Every structure is written in structure tokens, then in C-alpha cells.
Image (cartoon, grey):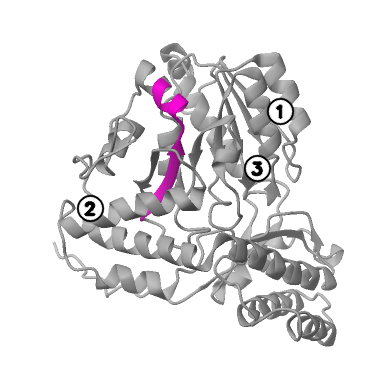
């Protein structure tokens, strides 16, 4: 029996203009490819991990000693954060889109008893978990969090900071304040906001655990390291209950990053096989984030998002999101229900936009690592072409005039 030897895989360059991952900075790719082959306990690799830990504390805006990164995507960071949730723990989870919905499923899996798992192994209905579902396209408000926590008095409360499924920013201050008032330990999915928005997590004392990812705001390779940060209270809770995991146990993970008993030590202990290539890339993405500065980057996202928002509105679309890095929109009325067709047409041409992954189907256009006049203008023109291809009407001169008016004088290229 013979087996076909496949030709080399060549993946053409794509403009990543969706919710994430974003196009990785060339300097990060160079750091990845230039790393020498080193074992995971080699001195430079460990030094890079120590420096990453300190850079992450600066980027998160925290004094939390337990601030490090988990090998993998944002899901690995979230699983690590949720590892302290034990069977029978009371949880209130707020959802307003696809990804916070998956987070809520994870929490039900963590909190379910053996009997609840046996009754429904893939979708356990944990009686101790209350899921507060907010309709797609609406934010989680401080009033909703306050009312829910006052009623249920849970051990844990969960919310996404920015919900990428619908492009909505949720009320982080209101969530933190309510957690403090009602004695809940807050858990936040910051997958979409870290590295895009300027905020300091120490300003939100009601939140005990934070989880993010490498491939969105930090614009690193998708499979590098996902940032997490935990308060002393979270770690003390974890010490008292344990966790049903080895790989994603925050205490074990932290030891490899040189964090033992809440203190930085000179050398971490082995926990898993880390990649020197990934460490080099992640280190460079953090360096670039700090060198640019979160104040400047946050302002830049808001400025360029406004240009994109106004341009698609000029094309007859309705924008329903408020995230600075992502536009979520409805197509013009004459093109309603053709969102998937438009997205597939764009992706076939290397223009990587996305639909929403839950009803109602909308179009998502992102600007991760596309913060310049040329990149945003290209996104606008490609989207205009896609609308025209479906038979929609776009005033080319009006779009070009809008781009010129915004970029001609007020925004540096």
C-alpha cells in the first residue's frame, strides 16, 4: 500500500480584518524565527520568561505577584482562571455573546457535581451556576450585575470585559463594585481588551482573576502565551480547595515563571516544556506594547475605529458595536440576509472579515494591528468593493472624500 506524499503547505498572506487573531508584527515574527534552538530550561529562555513576567505586570497595571502567562491561546488562560471553581461552588455568569457563552459553559463544567456531569456530560446543568443571559448586542450593565449578585450572593461572579461576539463593552467598574459589595470573587475575560485599551486591573479590587490572550491586543503568534493575573485572595482560595488539574493549576504554572509563595525567585521550577521560539516572540510583543505605550495605542484604536465606523455608515450599514478594535454591523436593507455570502466572498480574496457566530448574523470587521491610514483605507475600499459585488450601491467619491477629510489633516499616517 502506497501513501501519497503531500506537497509543502503554502498559506497565502491574508489581511486579518476580523475580531482576532490579528496580523502579527513583522518584528515579532523575526524574533520567533531568529531564536536559536534552545531547551526550555536554557538560561536565555528562563531570563526571557522572567522579563515577560515583569512586562506583563506593567501592561496589566498590577502589583499582583501571580502575574504570568499560560502556553496556548486565550482558552488556556481562561481554563487556568476557572480552575479554582470547584464542584458545587456558587457562580453567577453574565453572557452577552458567543464567547462569554462558552465561558459560562466552562463554568458549568467546573462547578457541576459528578451526578450533574453524568446526567449531561457535554452540557452539565450545574444547579449552583446561574447564567444571566443578556440579549445579543446589548451590554452587561452595573444595574444588572448589582441586582443579580444581591439576589444570589455567589462565591464567584464572571463577565467578559469586551464581548467579541457582539462587539460590546461591558461595565467593568460596575461589576467590580458589585463584587465587593456582595462578597463575590470576580473573574474577568479580558481576551479582547488587554493591549488595546488602557486600564489598570488594580483599580478593580472586586476582581480576583483575569485572563487574556496573545493574538489580539498584543498581536503575537496565536500559539504563544496567554496572560493571566491573580490576587492574593484568589491564590489563598485555590490553596484551600485545590484544583482538578495539573497543567492549568495557577500555582504550578506560576512556579515555572519564578513565582513561589507569592514571591519572585531567581529561577523557576519545571512545570511544562516551554518553547524558546514562543518565549522570544512573546517577549518582543510585550516590548513593542510598552515601547508604543498603552495611552497612545488606545487613542489610536479609537481614532481609526471612528474612521471605519463612519465609512461603513456612509455605505448604508448600521453599526451596533462599541469596541474600539472591532466594528459589528448590519448590511444595508437591500442586502439583508446576505451577510455570510459577503463574508465568504471577502475571505476568498484574502480579506479576512468574520460573521458573528450567533444569531442574528452580522458582519465583523476588525483593525487589530492595522493602525495606520494605509491599512484602514484598504479595509474600507475592500469592503466597499464587496458591497458593490453583491449589487449594493456605494458612492465611491463620498467614501474617498471621507477618508481624505479624516486622514488628510487630523491623523498621522
| Camera-side mark, 1 or 3 | 1
Label 2 to label 1, Cα distance in Å? 41 Å
335 or 296: nearer the viewer = 296
Q: Choose the circle earlier in sequence order: 1 or 3.
A: 3
298 or 309: nearer the viewer = 298
Would you place residue 338 above or below residue 407 in this image? above
Q: Which residue is mark 3?
A: 97
Image x and y of residue 2, in percent = 15, 65
Left or right for 230, reference 199: left
Q: Which residue is mark 1?
A: 145
Image x and y of residue 212, in percent = 49, 47
Q: Residue at x 78, y 63 (%)?
A: 331
Residue 121 - label: none
Task: Please identify the quadrant where the C terminus is shown.
Answer: bottom right
Whether residue 356 appears in this view of the structure is yes
Q: Choose the circle earlier in sequence order: 2 or 1.
A: 2
Q: Secondary structure at mark 3?
A: loop
Q: Which residue is mark 2?
A: 46
Left or right for 83, reference 208: left
Q: Quadrant of residue 121?
A: top left
Q: Which residues are magenta?
A: 224-236
Image x and y of residue 144, in percent = 75, 29
Q: Secondary structure at mark 1?
A: helix
Task: Please identify the quadrant where the N terminus is shown.
Answer: bottom left
Q: Residue at x 35, y 60 (%)?
A: 283
100 or 36: nearer the viewer = 36
Amino acid at each position: 500500500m502506497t501513501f501519497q506524499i503531500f506537497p509543502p503547505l503554502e498559506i497565502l498572506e491574508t489581511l486579518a480584518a476580523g475580531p482576532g487573531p490579528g496580523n502579527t508584527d513583522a518584528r515579532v515574527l523575526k524574533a520567533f524565527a531568529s531564536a536559536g534552538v534552545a531547551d526550555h530550561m536554557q538560561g536565555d529562555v528562563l531570563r526571557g520568561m522572567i522579563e515577560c513576567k515583569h512586562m506583563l505586570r506593567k501592561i496589566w497595571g498590577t502589583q499582583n505577584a501571580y502575574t504570568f502567562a499560560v502556553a496556548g491561546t486565550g482558552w488556556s488562560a481562561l481554563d487556568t482562571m476557572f480552575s479554582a471553581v470547584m464542584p458545587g461552588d456558587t457562580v453567577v455568569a453574565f453572557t452577552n455573546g458567543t464567547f462569554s457563552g462558552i465561558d459560562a459553559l466552562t463554568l458549568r463544567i467546573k462547578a457541576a457535581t459528578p451526578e450533574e456531569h453524568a446526567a449531561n456530560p457535554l452540557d452539565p446543568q450545574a444547579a449552583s451556576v446561574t447564567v444571566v443571559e443578556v440579549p445579543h448586542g446589548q451590554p452587561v450593565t452595573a444595574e444588572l450585575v448589582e441586582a443579580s449578585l444581591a439576589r444570589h450572593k455567589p462565591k464567584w461572579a464572571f463577565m467578559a470585559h469586551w464581548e467579541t461576539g457582539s462587539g460590546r463593552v461591558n461595565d467593568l467598574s460596575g461589576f467590580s463594585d458589585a463584587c465587593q459589595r456582595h462578597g463575590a470573587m470576580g473573574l474577568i475575560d479580558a481576551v479582547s481588551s488587554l493591549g488595546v485599551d488602557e486600564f489598570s486591573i488594580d483599580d478593580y479590587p472586586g476582581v480576583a482573576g483575569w485572563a487574556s490572550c496573545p493574538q489580539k491586543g498584543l498581536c503575537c503568534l496565536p500559539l504563544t502565551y496567554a496572560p493571566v493575573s491573580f490576587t492574593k485572595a484568589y491564590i489563598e482560595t485555590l490553596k484551600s480547595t485545590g484544583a482538578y488539574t495539573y497543567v492549568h493549576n495557577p500555582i504550578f504554572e506560576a512556579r515555572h515563571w519564578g513565582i513561589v509563595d507569592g514571591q519572585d525567585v531567581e529561577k523557576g521550577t519545571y512545570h511544562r516544556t516551554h518553547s524558546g521560539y514562543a518565549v522570544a516572540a512573546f517577549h518582543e510583543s510585550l516590548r513593542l506594547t510598552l515601547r508604543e505605550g498603552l495611552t497612545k495605542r488606545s487613542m489610536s484604536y479609537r481614532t481609526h475605529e471612528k474612521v471605519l465606523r463612519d465609512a461603513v455608515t456612509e455605505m448604508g450599514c448600521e453599526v451596533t458595536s462599541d469596541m474600539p478594535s472591532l466594528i459589528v454591523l448590519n448590511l444595508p436593507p437591500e442586502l439583508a440576509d446576505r451577510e455570510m455570502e459577503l463574508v465568504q466572498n471577502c475571505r476568498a480574496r484574502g480579506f479576512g472579515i468574520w460573521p458573528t457566530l450567533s444569531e442574528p448574523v452580522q458582519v465583523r470587521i476588525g483593525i487589530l494591528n492595522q493602525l495606520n491610514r494605509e491599512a484602514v483605507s484598504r479595509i474600507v475600499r475592500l469592503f466597499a468593493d464587496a458591497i458593490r459585488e453583491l449589487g449594493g450601491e456605494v458612492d465611491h467619491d463620498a467614501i474617498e472624500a471621507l477618508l481624505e477629510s479624516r486622514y488628510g489633516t487630523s491623523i498621522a499616517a
